[in-house]
Image (cartoon, rainbow, N blue to C red):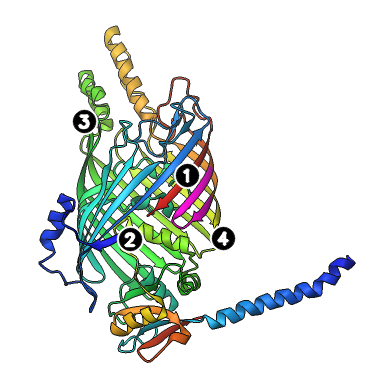
Amino acid sequence: MVQQSIPGRLPVALATCALACLPLCANAGAAPGEAAAPAWKLSGFGTLGAVYASSRSADFTASVLRADGAGHTRAWSPDVDSRLGAQLDLHRGAWSGVLQVVSEQRVDGSYRPQLEWANVKYQLTPDIAVRAGRIALPVFLGAESRKVGYTIPWVRTPVEVYGSLPISSSDGLDATWRWHTGPVQHATQAFAGRTDQDLHNGLRIKADNIVGLSHSIERGAFSARLSAAGARLNTAIGEELFAILPAFGPAGNALAGRYAIRDKRVSMVSAGMGIDPGAWFVSAECGRTRTDSLLGGGTSAYVGVGLRRGAFTPYLGYAQVRADVPTRDPGLPLDGLPPPLAAVAGQVNAGINGLLATIPVQSTWSAGLRWDAAANIALKLQLERVRPRDGTRGALINDQPDFRRDHAVHVASVALDFVF
Amino acid sequence: MRALSLFRPSLRRLLAACVLGIAAADACAELVVVVSSRSTVAAISADQVAAIFLGHASRFPDGAPAVAVDQQLGAPQRDSFYRELTGKSPALLKAHWSKMVFTGRGQPPREADGDAGVRRLVAANPSMIGYIDRDALDASVRAVLALP
């Protein structure tokens, strides 16, 4: 990490926001007697990974928002876990700013960096902080830090739980209040905002009216977090199908209303806990996502346990997600339709069911070893048995016509995580 | 068997020497958590100290603002302080702070050079809290918690 006084040049967006405010109340929240010198710090994180998957007819990935992965596209893929992140922190008195960019494989296959965090924080009191700008959504146990592999024991957060979040960031406001009851430390965070993310080729995913609450508890080795978030979602995924449906009258309109992602309410709730006295740890979490659309909804859970023996951390984990909505739909009734129309209706039905089959139902057993090889560097080896269920493709992508549903895929991963 | 039993007493002696040696080393390196002699903080629990040093709390039990001061990375005081208090190795501590930093939740405590450096900083500021060897205590700071 590099630490210095503020130099002349800074990223424009953050500088204008942060610096415009700084002279106003430079010393307001600084600790008494502590110098409030403006300072900046550059830090970063990354993962160099390689993943092998036994399937040749679908790709294993860490997220659905990827172009490809290991398995069908190539047996060994560097794209599943590899990423690089850089962060600039600015600090002056009660004001601070953070700018974080992350480069990882995107839906279009590029590694174009994305702005993960960009906000200005004002520390109102030692216990209350407000932020304006972009934050990663504080949902699940650690959705905000899931990209920093070094902070987690496993190679990646379970795809069943974290792989299908419909939205992961919010541009808006949030406030965190820290308080305590006896020896228990609490942090309550409320947030509100919106997001508009470009997936690729102009396909966007927009969420408005994002609101949520996250509450964390720490007591010695025990920690827990409850979170809930909701938003109204809009995206053009599947729009070519929904454009045809009204031609089929009330039945078509009903289908479009059920599945089109137009102003649909999404919600994510989760509860997670961990116990980590040092020599061993256990963490468990369950969550529920609803979208009232073709993105489906599901209940997910995982449990992970590990032992720490010197620099080595062997671990075991189990994760699963099941759909809370049907992953098939009879679609438009074909009876009584004239043959040309019946053919179109058949195609529409196949299209809808093709999309519904991407709602993941899957379970994974994993075993691995983390080796803290050197200061700030961890090397991990992980073996997994991934089983898509209920005729879905699970959390796999790029499934081919010869993809055998309900068959386990074996995955082996090596990852080198670093922070600097 | 006979050869083994011949070895046993010396093994036992060796073990005893090890245990004593470790105990002696621990006794020498007893750590105390200190605040300024001008601070109003009387006593503080191990959990509360841990919460302040891990960035989960920013106040003393009496409500006064608290600012942690660390020994430098690699200092034996630092390693045994976090091991005793939180069970965390230097690598786990790095993972903890990486999580805090990369989610914009906070920065690790500032570092001071050795017992003398920590004592000087803490003595000068009633909101600061640090840890030093018991042998390094003087009138400028006050011990509020002893770590075995």
Instruction: Say the numbered circle drawn on residue A310.
Output: 4
What residue sits 42% from the left and 67% below the top? Answer: B73
Do the dots labelled 4 and 1 sit on one chain? yes
Residue B16 vs residue A53: left or right? right
**Relative to A419, B87 lies left or right:** right
- A63 on left or right of A52: left
Question: Magenta residues: mostly which secondary structure?
Answer: strand
Q: Dot 1 corresponds to which residue?
A: A415
Q: Image height check: is A247 above or below A309?
A: above
Instruction: Give the mark, 4 or 1, whose residue is nearer the N terminus.
Output: 4
Asked which secondary structure carries label 1, the reply is strand
**Amino acid at dot 1:** Ala
Q: Residue at x 36, y 87 (%)?
A: B141
Asked if residue A336 can be seen in this view, the reply is no
Q: Look at label 3 and name its amino acid.
A: Gly
Q: Are marks 2 and 3 in contact (CB under 8 Å)?
A: no
Q: Earlier in the sequence, mark 4 or mark 2?
A: 2
Q: Which residues are magenta?
A: A370-382
| Residue in front for this viewpoint, A185 or B92 | B92
- Name the residue beneath numbered marker 3: A202
